[in-house]
Structures are given as structure tokens and as C-alpha cells.
Amino acid sequence: MQEIFFFDDGPAPLPKKDVYIDHVKAHPYPDGKRVQVTITLSPFLEKPNLAIRINDHNNEVIVTAEVLEPISVTTEITLHIKPNSPQLSHSLIVDLYYEQDEPQDTKSVDFYPSGEAPTS
């Protein structure tokens, strides 16, 4: 009889202490008021938590979100923002943590809410 596998044969899930953020991506919508955030984690045995924030060009926080115990390695979320200067660089920062501990991994990426860097 042939075996049927329902689970991906990808990389083995990692223990809590070894889980990390593989990459983050910020994709601004054309309206400049929303950002699609994609976060990819390493495979995990225990579900981590994610703290997400977007800072403006003055490093002031303009939006935050928490994702508690995501069920898959890829998380997508749309954040609504009100940038004062959409033509200037903003930063997406994602912290991975368990319980109330300090973040065990942080990744960030810069983007322009207007969707493109200003031309000089």
C-alpha cells in the first residue's frame, strides 16, 4: 500500500531557543495608507510571538501590532498607517519573543509609504 503524506518534508522544526526570523518584507499599497507586512520564520516546535512596529523618518512609532502564537512560518498582516511624510523612509521592525522575555531575534527593513524612493 502506498503511503500518503500530509505534511511538508521541509526543514525540521527548531527548539524554542533556536527559532529566528528568516526575513521580513514591507509592501506599501498605492494609497500610501496601508502596508502589507510579510514575516517568515524558521520552522518551530513551540509557537513564538511577534511584536511589529513601523517607525517614521524621525524614528517615532506610528503603528504597532502583536501576533501571538502564529500557526505557520509565514505571517501576513496589513497595517494601516497615517504617515506625515510618505515620501521619506520608514522602518518596519519585527521582534520575535517567547512569553515576556527580551526579543531573541529582531529584523528590520526600510520602505517608503509612497511606494518608491524619491528621485534626486
Image (spheres, helix red, strand yellow):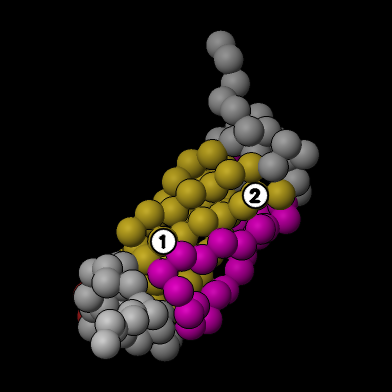
Using the image as rendered, state which of residue 9 and residue 18 is in the foreground: 9
The amino acid on which the numbered mark 2 sits, given as a three-letter code, is Val
Residue named by callout 1? 40
Image quadrant in which you'd find residue 114: top right
Image quadrant in which you'd find residue 119: top right
Q: How far apart are marks 1 and 2 (CA)?
A: 16 Å
Instruction: Assign a secondary structure to mark 1.
Output: strand
Q: Going from the N terminus, do you reach mark 1 or mark 2 first?
A: 2
Q: Where is residue 24 in the image (x, y as percent from the top left)?
A: 44, 53
Q: Position of residue 91 (x, y in %)?
A: 52, 47
Majority secondary structure of magenta residues: strand
Residue at the top extreme of this rendering: 120
Q: Which residue is drawn at 51% across and 66% down?
A: 75
Report if residue 78 lies within the magenta region. Answer: yes
Instruction: Assign a secondary structure to mark 2.
Output: strand
Q: Is residue 35 above or below residue 102?
A: above
Report if residue 10 lies within the magenta region. Answer: no
| 28 with respect to 69 (left or right) | right
Q: Which residue is drawn at 33% across and 72% down?
A: 8
| 82 with respect to 102 (left or right) | right
Q: Position of residue 23 (x, y in %)?
A: 38, 54
Residue named by callout 2? 35
Q: Is residue 51 above or below residue 49?
A: above
Bounds of the magenta span? 57-81
Using the image as rendered, state which of residue 61 and residue 70 is in the foreground: 70
Image quadrant in which you'd find residue 63: bottom right
